[in-house]
Image (cartoon, rainbow, N blue to C red):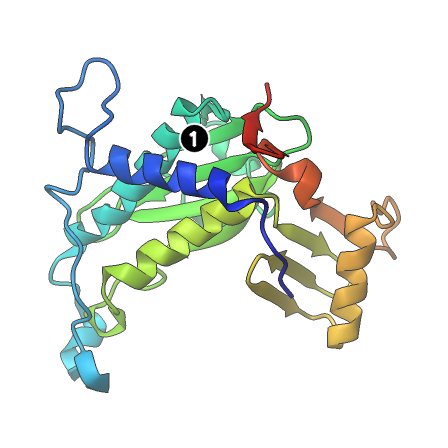
Amino acid sequence: MSGACPPGKPVAVVRVAVYRHQRGRADPPGRGRGRLHGDLGRHAGWAEPHPDGGSPAEEEYSRCLDPGKYRLLTARAEAWTRALTGLGLATTEPLTAADAPGAWRKGLPYDVSPTRAHRLRPHRAGAQPLLISYRGFDGCDDNIVLISTGEPAVLRASLPPCGCDACDDGSEPLLEQLDAAVVDVVIGRVVHVVTPRGEVAGHASGWEADGVGSTADVERIFDDARAGRSPAPRPARAAVVVTAQPIRSAWWIATTFGWARSR
């Protein structure tokens, strides 16, 4: 399922800010121009290493020759943080190691503590917070980025999903997935519902379901969640973990002439 996002101008403004921050053109106080922790100069994108549908070599499934390249995702996530706070849409709240296990609905994703994490709490009432966390592999401490939303949070994306060279499709798809996971929250398009049989998650480009019956069942669950009909104190009903009604859940207020921030 999908739906039209709010007027395009707010998303475009935020995206421009993200790209400027990632290229070091909008530095916070205390950092030199052109410097950004994890900037593009040190973490450039890369092409699909298996073009034209070529098959990976067997040894690629058990290696990653350059794990540091995935810090490009770290730089992108940091750019999103700076853009959203810099535009006055949210405030950053660091997540301590002691608080991390309780920050997610199901406990730590993959049972691994993040090396660092923070919430982006939107100023607009009713909007869902973002939880951006980092962990690492193969000698890096933050080359995996996790995007979550809600409080307690549900995981929306963990990137890269696999770090082996065989599963590498280049940097562009990963950046697109990271951007989409953040934008879905910021424009108010994420719905996550837990039922006695399983879970359903909806976003701007579709939905996923686990343990739930037909497509009609999924659509009904989403309709009930968005209408506030399944807050579920009783085990037999669905528990709405994250709801999204785009007009009220976006991080800004759409206006006739564009958008306005709300504090």
**Residue at 39% of width from left, 23% of height from top?**
86
Where is residue 212 shown, x and y percent of the image? Answer: 73, 70
Where is residue 237 shown, x and y percent of the image? Answer: 86, 55
- Residue at disc 1, secondary structure: helix
Q: Is residue 177 toward the left or the right of residue 201 in the image?
A: left
Asked if 249 appears above or below 263 in the picture, the reply is below
Bin the neighbour count of mark 1 within 10 Å (Cα to Cα): few under 14, some 14-19, many 20 and up: many
**Residue at 65% of width from left, 38% of height from top?**
249
Q: Is residue 64 toward the left or the right of residue 161 in the image?
A: left
Residue matched to label 1: 84
Q: Is residue 28 toward the left or the right of residue 182 in the image?
A: left
Q: Does the rendering let one see residue 126?
A: yes
Given residues 189 and 255, the one toward you in this image is: 255
- Image quadrant holding the C terminus, namely top right
Quarter of the image holding residue 97? top left
Where is residue 36 shown, x and y percent of the image? Answer: 19, 30
Asked if 229 appears above or below 37 in the picture, the reply is below
Where is residue 78 shown, x and y percent of the image? Answer: 32, 35
Quarter of the image holding residue 203? bottom right
